[in-house]
Image (cartoon, rainbow, N blue to C red):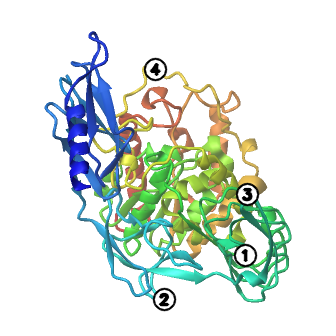
Amino acid sequence: MRKLYSILLLTALLLLSACATAAPAAPQCRLVLESSPAFTANTQTAAVTPGQSVTFTLTPADGYTLIGADYPGAVLTRTGADYTLTLPDVRYSTAVAVTAQKSDTALYYNDNLGGDWQKTPVTPSHTRLNTAPDGALFANTGHTLTGWNTAPDGSGQAVGLGSRTAPGTRLYAQWAAQNDAAEFTYTVNNNAATITGWQGRGETLAIPDTLGGAPVVEIAAGAFAGAPCKTVIFSDTLRRVQPGAFTGSAVESVTLFDNLQQISDYAFEKCTYLRTLHINAATAPVYSGSYYATFADKYDRLLSLESTQKLVLFSGSSARFGYDSAALDAALPSYGVVNMGVFAYTNALPQLELIRARMREGDILLLSPEFDAAKRQFCTTNAFDDDFFCMAEANYDMVAELDLQQYSGVFSALGSYLQTRAGMTQSSYAVSPSDLDEDGNAVDTPSYNAYGDYVLYRSDAADDTPIYGLPVDYTTAAFPYDTYIAPANAEFSRFTAAGVHVWLTYSPRNSRAVSAESTPEAIAALDEYFRKNLDVTILTNLSDSLLPGRYFFGTDNHLSTHGVALRTEQVIAALTSQLQSEGLTP
């Protein structure tokens, strides 16, 4: 048998080493990429006419950096999440080996069942590291892996599957024993089980992953209506939760996986005690490298400054494009700076609540609400939206920190988010937003700095012409007290109650991108209206935020690099003046 194998291998190598000549005019050279645990390729083989180039797309495994290839003139370039390998002027058939470097950065896992520790290298693309997702390391029949913990009994730091923790952390698997099959009524169709009822009485409900020999994929309407369970843990096989599934139950906490396909608030109607949602990653991320993913990175920085006096910048994208935080840091050495601005068209309320939990007495929250997204920026609703889940994808544990009693629409927004991402191209936690520009193109220098600013050079516009032709209304009529001011004040008061200074500087905008009604008199009246009614300290004049259009790049509220310098100089002067007036050290 060994001799036959050797003959077959030799024959294969001979075939590989010769340029195939199916027709005299079209010889072919074959290239084969050697398999490696360091990457996957779009294809392992290629056949070309001698003299042509070959291109492969390589996706690195987490914990690996690709370095080169043993082929003359090979060019390996990073293209976002992937690498492009180009082999020029192919003249012969050969096998090509790609060389890779394994990261020294790692997390350590224990199955908590008596097994040995597993060291898992992780690409150090973020301040904290994403943990292994569901199904990557361990299995335990009849149990659901609900997360990781730094203590075997779950009394330490809890980390969700795929969520973040510090490099070098040692993590124990946390298992939930699934409820006995005898407690459930169910149907099986096409090898898929649907739970229709439950006769259990316990406070913990862990949905089995199989019933009747079939995977549990659905929970029917009314299956757990009025149930006494307080902790509900879905299996990672579950795909659909029908409206009315948990109506009136005692549920307080839900743990689910992001391969779920259908869920809405109607599934938890009249569940008045529901406070906590844990999301575990069972699939690869799709928003890594996008601006959405910057929120988790900015949150990492916020955590690193938790015990430090700090200045937190908050708005939407006008903040990430609008500050030179390094200049702020230098001008205000008593304060660590973090730019939390990401996206204005998602509700600011859950973002602000995450920020508030990490601030302390004496810290400064510097707001710069964007008026074209005023409803979200002024917290006019408590409803979740799917964009917030896009921002939380890189660290779902942020969702678990929020008290669901404060919000509406949580599960419906989650369902919308999960349906959208199910059809998107998967990426890797190893990809950082700083690897790409705003259009998703790979960059040679980081596009974001450690503070959270977008730092790629942005030229001034050619003239002051508005980009979008969507004028914003800068009038008092556009901001009714009950709709805008009252809910904003309710949130700001939570910060001031904790001793946090809540200050405001208006978001920059192209001065021509305002409505016809936004006259100088109307703008001055709106400024006075905000100063009288908003429970914040306003540092700058509204008219000073309306700048010539030449200082913007690509939009009417994203500043050019020159515009950032001018705006930051203005903000530094305003902050310094305010600190001195209150007897505080800059």
Question: Between marks 2 and 3, how big is the CA–CA gap?
Answer: 32 Å
Of the residues shown, which amino acid type is indicated by label 2? Ser
Crowd band around label 2 with a 10 angstrom C-alpha radius: few (<14), some (14–19), many (20+): few
Q: Does residue 181 appear to the left or right of 57 in the view shown?
A: right
Residue with the mark numbered 1: 274
Residue 305 appears in the rendering: no
Could you give the CA–CA distance between mark 3 and mark 4, rounded to whole angstroms?
A: 44 Å
Q: Which mark is residue 412?
A: 3
- What residue lies at 63% left-to-right and 68% top-to-bottom? 256
Element type at marker 3? helix
Residue placed under numbered mark 4 in the picture: 463
Quarter the N terminus occupies = bottom left
Q: Position of residue 93 (x, y in %)?
A: 21, 30
Answer with left or right where residue 158 lies relative to residue 246.
Answer: left
According to the picture, the residue beneath numbered tag 2 turns out to be 155
Which three-letter amino acid code belongs to the residue tagged 3?
Ser
Mark 3 or mark 4, earlier in chain: 3
